[in-house]
Image (cartoon, rainbow, N blue to C red):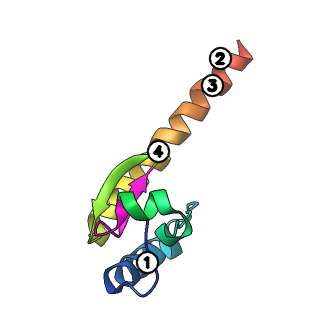
């Protein structure tokens, strides 16, 4: 969750972009000004970064830690898909 003209949000996007160049992953940016409810909930709390629905960072994104968490989620996702596929093959 982010908002326009926010220095912290811009910096977080740069970090996430660098990691995304190295490790492809899907990302959705949500501008809190798009909804009164989001603005109420996240105003003063941006950027807030979630990874697979879990809050991971608020205000600042540590690049090394972000990479670790993204890799971990990709591995977990791959294991889940492999397990589901093996269930189908049984």
Secondary element under disc 1, as helix, strand or loop, is: helix
The reply to whether the C-beta atoms of the residues labelled 3 and 2 are less than 8 Å apart is yes
Q: Residue at x 50, y 71 (%)?
A: 33
Residue 42 pos. (x, y %): 36, 62
Residue beneath the point at 55% across and 63% down:
27
The residue labelled by disc 1 is: 13
User: Are the two marked residues, 4 and 3, in contact with CB atoms closer than 8 angstroms?
Assistant: no
**Other-residue count near label 1 (Cα within 10 Å), few / some / many at <14 / 14–19 / ≥20:** some
- Which label was assigned to residue 75? 4
* CB under 8 Å between discs 4 and 2: no
Q: Nearer the viewer, residue 87 or 61?
A: 61
Tell me which segment is drawn in magenta.
Answer: 42-51
Q: Is residue 85 magenta?
A: no
Q: Earlier in the sequence, mark 1 or mark 4?
A: 1
Residue at (43, 65) in percent of width and height: 39
Residue 19's quadrant in the figure? bottom left
- SS for callout 4: helix
Q: Which residue is mark 3?
A: 84
What is the x, y in percent for residue 17?
A: 48, 77
Task: Name the residue beneath numbered marker 2.
Answer: 87
- Determine if the magenta segment contains residue 47: yes
**Among the two numbered marks 2 and 1 on one chain, the one whose residue lies closer to the N terminus:** 1
**Drawn side of residue 45 relative to residue 9, left or right:** left
């Amino acid at each position: 969750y982010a908002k326009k003209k926010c220095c912290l949000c811009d910096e977080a996007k740069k970090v996430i972009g660098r990691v995304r160049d190295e490790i492809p992953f899907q990302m959705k940016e949500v501008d809190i000004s798009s909804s009164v409810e989001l603005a109420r909930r996240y105003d003063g709390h941006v950027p807030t970064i979630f990874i697979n629905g879990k809050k991971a960072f608020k205000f600042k994104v540590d690049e090394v830690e972000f990479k670790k968490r993204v890799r971990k989620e990709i591995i977990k996702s791959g294991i889940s898909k492999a397990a589901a596929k093996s269930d189908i093959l049984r």
